[in-house]
Image (cartoon, grey):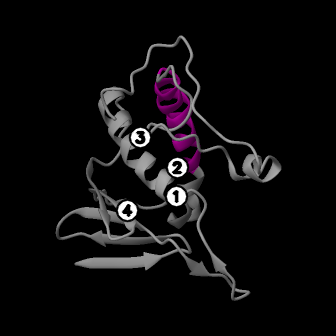
Amino acid sequence: MAKKEWSTYERRYCIDSDARTFTKTEIHHNTNVRGELTTPWKSTERIVNEYYALQLVKKKTTIPVPQPLLLKKELTSWSITTEYVAGTALDELPGNIRATAVPNADRYINDLVLPQLATLKSRCSGALTGDVIPPRRVIEKYPEKKWTPTRTQTQSIFSATR
């Protein structure tokens, strides 16, 4: 398999197993099933933040995440490229194996991943890029609100990775 490509309404994906890379590119506009032009919510902010979040998790924890390789803007779309990590999704496993794998994955997340993520602190609210990206349901409830970062007294660990 040289390349495998697919897309969703807001992203294009490409696995290049020869180069051992995975690339995710934002799609700015798309047409939904009703024929309406839609724009993915906070697309640029989310894809850029994802790159910096991967860098942070890779640097500050032992949580296995793909190595972030490249963040770039081509014309109007941002993309991130990471190392490709082959694997099998839990929902693709046969039932008898999934019955053991799912509780093991839950235990791993609860015992190793979440405690490490809980240690990551910042003195600034919002994304690693400085943007505040509240959940969509919050934006819909308060459409006029301007979301800006706020500072606290917590030591920042993000400044080195920005």
Amino acid marked by disc 3? Ala
- CA distance for labels 1 and 2: 7 Å
Residue contact at pointers 1 and 2, CB within 8 angstroms: yes
Magenta-tinted stretch: 100-119
Amino acid marked by disc 4? Trp
Of badges 4 and 3, the one in the foreground is 4
Q: What residue did someone put label 1 on? A: 90
Residue 66 lies in the magenta-colored region: no
Q: What residue did someone put label 3 on? A: 53
Of badges 4 and 2, the one in the foreground is 4
> What percent of the width, then of the height, locates residue 38?
63, 75
**Which numbered disc flags the more N-terminal residue, 3 or 1?**
3
Per the image, label 4 sits on a secondary structure element best described as strand
> What percent of the width, then of the height, locates residue 25?
39, 67
**Which numbered disc flags the more N-terminal residue, 4 or 1?**
4
**Which numbered disc flags the more N-terminal residue, 1 or 2?**
1
Q: What residue did someone put label 4 on? A: 78
- Residue 100 bears which disc, if any? none
- Classify residue 75 by image quadrant: bottom left
Amino acid marked by disc 1? Leu
Crowding near the residue tagged with mark 1, few <14, some 14–19, many ≥20 C-alpha atoms within 10 Å: some
* Observer-nearest of 140 and 106: 140
* Residue 141 to residue 119: above or below: below
Residue placed furthest toward the top: 153
Crowding near the residue tagged with mark 2, few <14, some 14–19, many ≥20 C-alpha atoms within 10 Å: some
Per the image, label 2 sits on a secondary structure element best described as helix
Q: Residue at x 57, y 31 (%)?
A: 149
> What percent of the width, then of the height, locates residue 152?
57, 16
- CA distance for labels 4 and 3: 16 Å
Q: What residue did someone put label 2 on? A: 101
Q: Residue at x 66, y 82 (%)?
A: 32
